[in-house]
């Protein structure tokens, strides 16, 4: 695939970094809202907290996560990093994809159930609501942890190429071939030519 120009790469970098930081910030917002809903004794505030969390999860966070995935994939395809060339890039791609698929399905479902149940009287005696609330809190912590881990991967870029040994063998073999050609190893033997005559 054709490599990106400097302007294109800069644009992709801005979009990718911005969406990734926004996604992480949204995760902290979700955690704060879930904690507020957990600690408050005001039923209206509790219900409002779950409604806000549901809206954030359904629209802004989904848009940010999709943008982060698409721009990250484009940066991988159009730069030297690739998508499955380096461990840190591949791990980031897998984690982003997992979060993008599981968050709307699991967290979105729990948030919607919490919105529905928190509007009922005597909700704190509802075991199903208590389970939803605990799942939302645990999901917020897990998402923030994974996003922070991916941020560290982007900055540190640990580990080597996925097929480092194979790559090194190819480089070594290529160097040996070039060395042999430079010393005439690939030319026909003079002795053989004389013997044939």
Image (cartoon, rainbow, N blue to C red):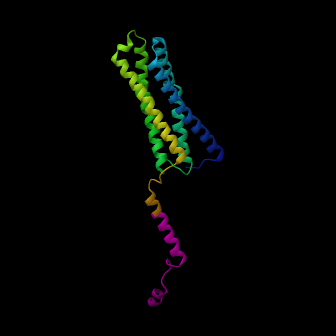
Which residue is at 43% across, 33% downward?
142
**Left or right: 8 in relation to 134:** right
Residue 14 spot, x, y in % from top left: 61, 39
Q: Can residue 197 be spotted in the picture? A: no
Q: Which residue is more in the foreground, 47 or 42? A: 42
Tell me residue 97's x, y (percent). Answer: 45, 37
Observer-nearest of 38 and 105: 38
**Which residue shows up at 51% across the image and 38% down it?**
69
Task: Say if the magenta span includes residue 150.
Answer: no
Main SS of the magenta part reads helix
* Residue found 56% across the figure and 32% down from its top: 22
Q: Residue drawn 47% across and 60% down?
A: 167
Task: Give the residue at the far top of this rendering.
Answer: 121
Question: Which region shows up in magenta?
Answer: 169-197
Of residues 29 and 18, which is closer to you in this image? Answer: 29
Locate residue 180, reporting x and y percent: 50, 75
The answer to if 195 sits in the magenta stretch is yes
Judged left or right of residue 133, residue 171 is right
Above or below: residue 142 compared with residue 81: above
**Residue situated furthest right in the rendering:** 7
Residue 52 appears in view: yes
Horizontal and vertical percent position of residue 36: 48, 20
Q: Is residue 71 above or below residue 109?
A: below
């Amino acid at each position: 695939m054709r490599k990106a120009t400097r302007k294109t790469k800069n644009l992709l970098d801005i979009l990718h970094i911005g969406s990734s930081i926004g996604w992480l910030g949204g995760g902290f917002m979700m955690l704060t809202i879930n904690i507020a809903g957990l600690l408050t004794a005001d039923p209206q505030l509790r219900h409002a907290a779950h409604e806000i969390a549901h809206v954030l999860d359904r629209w802004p966070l989904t848009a940010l996560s999709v943008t982060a995935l698409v721009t990250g994939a484009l940066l991988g395809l159009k730069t030297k990093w690739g998508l499955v060339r380096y461990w840190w890039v591949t791990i980031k791609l897998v984690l982003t994809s997992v979060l993008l698929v599981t968050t709307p399905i699991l967290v979105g479902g729990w948030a919607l159930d919490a919105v529905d149940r928190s509007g009922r009287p005597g909700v704190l005696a509802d075991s199903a609501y208590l389970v939803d609330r605990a799942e939302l809190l645990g999901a917020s912590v897990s998402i923030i942890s994974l996003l922070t881990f991916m941020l560290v991967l982007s900055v540190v870029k640990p580990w080597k190429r996925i097929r480092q040994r194979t790559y090194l063998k190819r480089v070594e073999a290529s160097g040996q071939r070039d060395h042999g050609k430079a010393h005439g190893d690939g030319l026909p033997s003079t002795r053989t030519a004389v013997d044939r005559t």
